[in-house]
Amino acid sequence: QSALTQPASVSGSPGQSITISCTGTSSDVGNYNLVSWYQQHPGKAPKLMIYEVIKRPSGVSSRFSGSKSGTTASLTISGLQADDEADYFCCSYAAYNTLIFGGGTKLTVL
Amino acid sequence: EVQLVESGGGLVKPGGSVRLSCAASGITFSDLWMNWVRQAPGKGLEWVGRIKSETDGGTTDYAAPVKGRFTISRDDSKNTLYLQLNSLKTEDTALYYCSTDIPMTGGTNFAYWGQGTLVTVSS
């Protein structure tokens, strides 16, 4: 099973909004509302930012939001801040009780 | 506060074996569905496998690249998760994290993470 497809990199200026896409298939993203998003700073463990497509865990800023259309999920970060610069990974529940990650997107805050 | 602490990593020869452990505290371990996720140096995240709580059957699921070589188990009396890695390949070199989800969300997210333990497969 191939990894979900994410852009290798995105960038934005402080205060702007950016969106990271995560494209799968009808066997994963398209068939389940079970997409999650993770932020990872260098040398640190990943941090859960969004789960079940749109839900934010306690403590995660409302600047982070998720959505899904068909086989593509998206993470939007509004009001970009310097500390948002990190790698972002999507993940989806898939067939046969497995989970699959995207390849990751490096966000640069200009 | 939930804490997950992995241990057991190191340098292993191709074809060799190693057992990783993940000690949990600050949470009712026996209720948890536990996962292993790995990250090769400079690469992305890869789900390795999962074990359900004993209450939910204690069954395991694995990613295709490790199925038949890796085994996940748990000892609820010790609040500890294990990952037995056999027939290791150089491509198994990675930082191995244990992780669990937000309670009662069906094991489909990774809310709590350890710091990881590094397994290096090399001759």
Image (tube, rainbow, N blue to C red):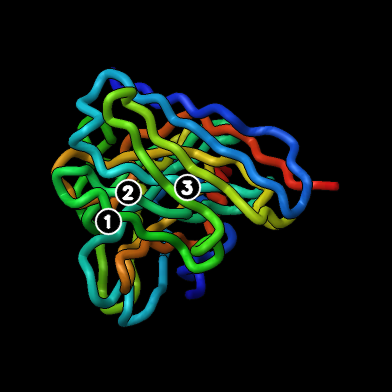
Q: Which numbered circle lies on residue B58? A: none
The answer as to whether the residues below labels 3 and 1 share one chain is no
SS at mark 1?
strand
Which label sits in the foreground, 3 or 1? Answer: 3
Give the CA separation, mark 3 to mark 1: 22 Å
* Residue labelled with disc 2: B51
How far from the left and from the top, in percent, is residue A21? 41, 65
Q: Are marks 2 and 1 in contact (CB under 8 Å)?
A: no
* Residue labelled with disc 1: A66
Q: Name the amino acid, label 3.
A: Val
Q: Is residue B42 left or right of residue A24?
A: right
Which image quadrant is residue B90 in?
Answer: bottom right
SS at mark 3?
strand
Q: Is residue A70 left or right of residue A4?
A: left
Residue in the image at 47% along x and 62% along y? A102
Residue in the image at 36% along x and 59% along y? B61
Give the CA separation, mark 2 to mark 1: 27 Å
How far from the left and from the top, in percent, is residue A45? 49, 34
Q: Name the amino acid, label 1.
A: Gly
Q: Which numbered circle lies on residue B37? A: 3
How far from the left and from the top, in percent, is residue B101? 27, 42
Q: Name the amino acid, label 2.
A: Ile
Q: Nearer the viewer, residue B31 or A62?
A: B31
Q: Are marks 3 and 1 in contact (CB under 8 Å)?
A: no
Residue in the image at 25% along x and 62% along y? A67
Chain letter behind tag 2:
B
Q: Dot 1: few (<14), some (14–19), or many (≥20) neighbours within 10 Å?
A: many
Which image quadrant is residue B24 in?
Answer: top left
Q: Is residue B13 left or right of residue A8?
A: right
How far from the left and from the top, in percent, is residue B81? 39, 35
The answer as to whether the residues below labels 3 and 2 share one chain is yes
